[in-house]
Image (spheres, grey):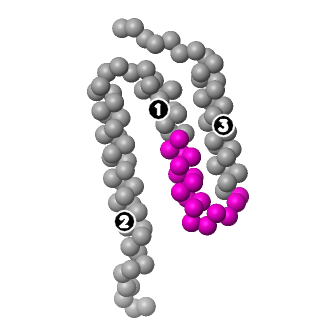
Amino acid sequence: MAETLVRKRTYFWVWVALICLTGLTGGISFINLGEWSTAIAMVIAVIKALLVATFFMHLLYEKQKVVWIWSAVGIIWLSILIVQTMDDYVTRGFLPVPGK
């Protein structure tokens, strides 16, 4: 099985990007962006996750389709969990609580 040789320089620059994005997340947390704070933090987190998956987990260099299929299944499953959690969280104020 032939493996793709990835240079250390690539890993270094991906690591630098991850550190910069982590610093950006920390810096943005001190700025009051209102309801956009969570959205911006989630976008930065998704970018960091994609960098880790593509370079450190070698998905960029993977030729087998089954690896891509299982990656897509994982992302779909995570999306289902997030949507169900947000469904519970968003609808809490709509239901009346007896006794109040």
Position of residue 92 measured from the top left corner of the image (x, y, whole percent): 40, 75
Q: Is residue 76 magenta?
A: no
Which of pointers 1 and 2 lies earlier in the amino acid sequence?
1
The residue sitting at 53% across, 41% down in the picture is 47
Position of residue 6 measured from the top left corner of the image (x, y, whole percent): 53, 15
Mark 2 packing: few (<14 Cα in 10 Å), some, or many (20+)?
Answer: few
- Circle 3 SS class: helix
The residue sitting at 36% across, 81% down in the picture is 95
Q: Which residue is mark 2?
A: 87
Query: In the rendered view, would you say 82 is above or below 94?
Result: above
| Distance between the alpha carbons at the discs numbered 2 and 3 | 32 Å
Q: Which residue is mark 1?
A: 53
Image quadrant in which the N terminus is located: top left
The residue sitting at 67% across, 46% down in the picture is 24
Q: Which residue is mark 3?
A: 19
Judge from the rendering whether residue 60 lies leftward or rightward of residue 13; answer left or right.
Answer: left
Query: In the rendered view, would you say 16 is above or below 95?
Result: above
Amino acid found under the numbered disc labelled 3: Ile
Position of residue 68 measured from the top left corner of the image (x, y, whole percent): 34, 30
Which of pointers 1 and 3 lies earlier in the amino acid sequence?
3
Q: Among all residues in the image, which is located at the extreme top?
A: 2
Mark 3 packing: few (<14 Cα in 10 Å), some, or many (20+)?
Answer: few
Amino acid found under the numbered disc labelled 2: Asp
- Give, as a single range, the part of the protein colored magenta: 30-47
Position of residue 58 measured from the top left corner of the image (x, y, whole percent): 45, 24
Which of the two residues, 85 or 11, is positioned nearer the viewer here?
11
| Distance between the alpha carbons at the discs numbered 1 and 3 | 16 Å
Mark 1 packing: few (<14 Cα in 10 Å), some, or many (20+)?
Answer: some
